[in-house]
Image (cartoon, rainbow, N blue to C red):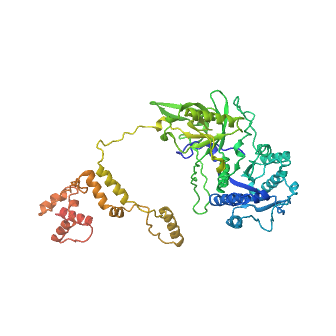
């Protein structure tokens, strides 16, 4: 699975088209998740917030599905129970039952899961139904292993055609990770199966509940199984000297094997959501330091820009797409010109600069694409107006360079202690170089009593810095006279009087669209649409008339008249001729008859027996013709 090109311009102004933008970003791909829940006796006996561990996990699954069915289009999810008394799966794996098959989300399936959780809350114990039965009996653990459960998940995802081009994950809920657990037998087999899942692009994410008693031993078994499911460091990655890599297996820091010991069941849901979001990586890059060493970073666009669909021209009758092609012709010979016969002229400093074919493309070559550290500046010098567009977030990634996780933590800790931010240059493929500011963020964990989950991870907030042309000093006209206390109080009263309750308004754009659509379907004239989003100035003035008058008097004085102003001078009315000589003199002046009103023209027509009906232009023509005839 190749990472998509990171776009530091996300959320900003339109940039030149990048060929990498045509690729479908990972964040918009179909998400396929298989939830595996340990349904043995410990998961049903121990409780969290009055609910058995297994049903806390099931409630978390139902919540995740509810969110996805609202925000996603075609995600696939399944729920598999391991350690059940009965066997219910298509591959006949012992003591494994499919509670919900792998399929697109449906409200009816989510309702079934919520009903199971509600019954467990009501009766204080869990029951998955007669088809699944209770937990497996003691002594039968030898027929169940983690490798078998992972093999089942692998088959489910490999046989589903819709999961081929998708982000695939397996989330494993359990509360047992001690040396005496018989299900942990076969560490080598489980690691090999985890490696097979990696080759198929399936991420394994375990979650552990803390049972009463000593803390779980999150050590060798699960750490090796999860490490086998992560990509190793690239051979060309340059590791930092002295960076300890014992606690960081590829992209799997120690905090990924998390114990949820919270007294609130909602903490498990927050943990699952946080882990899922951590893997929505947009791009993995190597941050090149001035010393030549590299730190691998995984970049995520926190705010994704929505690309506007391009307009397409279709035939009015057949509705077929019209394909256009542009060819350039020679003005003299009318022959077609190819790209090698075209040149580019630019006016530079009063002269004309000529670029030969291919020279213009070389101007956009700013070297190898990547992220390079330039230096460090005090964090206080970064201002909010320096951030152009939405910021991204970067975390350590050992897939680019081994040892990046430890080196990144050390770098972030030192930068935060010295209160500095990094300035780096970003060169994308075929794009202009950009200056980026990397602001460090220290890790923050919740107390162990609240689950010990990572609330804020180690990483960098990556902000795109503006060019010097983007910054300008705007002179602001500042009033020297400070407003009086009476004017400030009057302004407060105006604001309070204009306060209204929220009232949803229909979209006028949609109203116009559906009105036009209905009119076209019925072959009728479209009805007028009232835009309810426009401000009602008359109503607002009626609500705050007294307060506005008080503010006007406090700010401008009692003698201020808003209606008084420079009155427009009306042009003097043209004098009506009384004699025939005056009419002849007036008709000889261009446009003089047009200045007379209709009553004066009708009076002349009545006096000389002419027709008085018609428009003013007809009267003017009639009077001019009569005066000319003499």
Residue 604, quarter of the rendered image:
bottom left
The answer to which image quadrant residue 397 occupies is top right
Residue drawn at (47%, 70%) of the image: 525
Res. 165 visible in picture: no
Quarter of the image that includes the N terminus: top right
On screen, 87 above or below 559?
below
Residue 3 image offset from top left, x and y in percent: 68, 44
The x, y position of residue 239, in whole percent, is: 71, 31
Q: Quadrant of the C terminus?
A: bottom left
Q: Residue extending furthest top? A: 291
Quarter occupied by residue 71: bottom right
Camera sees residue 508 = yes
Q: Which residue occupies 59% across, 51% down? A: 324
The image shows residue 558 at horizontal and vertical percentages of: 22, 54
Question: Residue 412, position in %: x, y?
Answer: 61, 36
Relative to 482, residue 407 above or below = above
- Is 125 positioned to the left or the right of 445 in the image? right
Drawn side of residue 335 relative to residue 258, left or right = left
């Amino acid at each position: 699975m190749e990472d998509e090109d990171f776009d530091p311009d996300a959320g900003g102004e339109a940039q030149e088209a990048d060929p990498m933008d045509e690729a479908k970003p990972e964040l918009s791909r179909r998400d396929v998740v298989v939830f595996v829940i340990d349904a043995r006796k410990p998961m049903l006996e121990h409780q969290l917030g009055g609910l058995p561990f297994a049903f806390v996990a099931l409630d978390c699954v139902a919540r995740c599905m509810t969110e996805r069915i609202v925000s996603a289009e075609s995600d696939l999810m399944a729920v598999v129970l391991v350690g059940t008394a009965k066997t219910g799966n298509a591959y006949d794996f012992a003591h494994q039952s499919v509670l919900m098959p792998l399929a697109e989300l449906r409200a009816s399936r989510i309702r079934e899961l919520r009903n199971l959780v509600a019954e467990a809350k009501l009766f204080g114990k869990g029951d998955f139904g007669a088809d699944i039965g209770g937990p497996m009996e003691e002594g039968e653990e030898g027929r169940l292993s983690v490798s078998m459960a992972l093999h089942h998940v692998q088959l489910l995802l490999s046989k589903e055609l819709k999961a081929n081009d998708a982000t695939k994950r397996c989330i494993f809920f359990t509360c047992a990770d001690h040396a005496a657990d018989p299900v942990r037998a076969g560490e080598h087999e489980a690691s090999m199966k985890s490696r097979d899942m990696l080759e198929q692009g399936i991420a394994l994410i375990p979650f552990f509940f803390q049972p009463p008693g000593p803390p779980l031993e999150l050590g060798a078994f699960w750490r090796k199984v999860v490490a086998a499911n992560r990509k190793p460091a690239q051979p060309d990655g340059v590791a930092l000297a002295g960076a300890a890599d014992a606690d960081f297996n590829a992209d799997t820091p120690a905090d990924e094997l998390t114990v949820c010991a919270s007294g609130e069941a909602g903490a498990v849901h927050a943990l699952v959501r946080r882990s899922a979001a951590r893997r929505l990586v947009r791009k993995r890059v190597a941050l090149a330091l001035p010393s030549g060493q590299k730190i691998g970073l995984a970049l995520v666009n926190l705010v994704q820009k929505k690309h506007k669909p391009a307009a397409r021209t279709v035939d009015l009758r057949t509705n077929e797409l019209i394909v256009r092609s542009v060819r350039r012709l020679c003005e003299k010979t009318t022959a077609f010109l190819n790209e090698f016969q075209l040149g580019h002229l630019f006016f530079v400093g009063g002269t004309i600069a000529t670029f030969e074919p291919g020279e213009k493309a070389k101007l956009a070559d700013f070297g190898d694409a990547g992220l390079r550290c330039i230096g460090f500046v005090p964090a206080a010098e970064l201002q909010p107006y320096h951030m152009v567009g939405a910021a991204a977030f970067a975390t350590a990634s050992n897939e680019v360079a081994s040892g990046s996780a430890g080196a990144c933590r050390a770098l972030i800790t030192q930068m935060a202690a010295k209160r500095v931010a990094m300035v780096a240059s970003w060169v994308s493929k075929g794009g202009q170089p950009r200056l980026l500011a990397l602001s460090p963020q220290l890790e923050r964990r919740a107390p162990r009593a609240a689950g010990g989950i990572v609330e804020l991870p180690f990483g960098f907030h990556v902000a795109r810095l503006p060019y010097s042309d983007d910054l300008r000093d705007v002179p602001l006209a500042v009033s020297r006279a400070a407003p009086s206390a009476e004017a400030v109080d009057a302004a407060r009263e105006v604001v309070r009087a204009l306060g209204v309750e929220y009232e949803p308004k229909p979209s006028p754009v949609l109203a116009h669209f559906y009105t036009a659509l209905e009119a076209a379907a019925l072959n009728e004239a479209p009805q007028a649409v009232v835009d309810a989003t426009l401000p009602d100035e008359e109503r607002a003035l009626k609500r705050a008339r007294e307060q506005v008058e008080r503010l006007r008097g406090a700010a401008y004085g009692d003698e201020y008249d808003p209606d008084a102003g420079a009155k427009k001078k009306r042009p003097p009315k043209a004098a009506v001729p009384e004699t025939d000589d005056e009419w002849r003199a007036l008709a000889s002046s261009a446009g003089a008859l047009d200045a007379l009103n209709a009553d004066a023209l009708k009076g002349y027509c009545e006096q000389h027996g002419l027709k008085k009906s018609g428009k003013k232009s007809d009267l003017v023509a009639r009077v001019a013709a009569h005066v000319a005839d003499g």
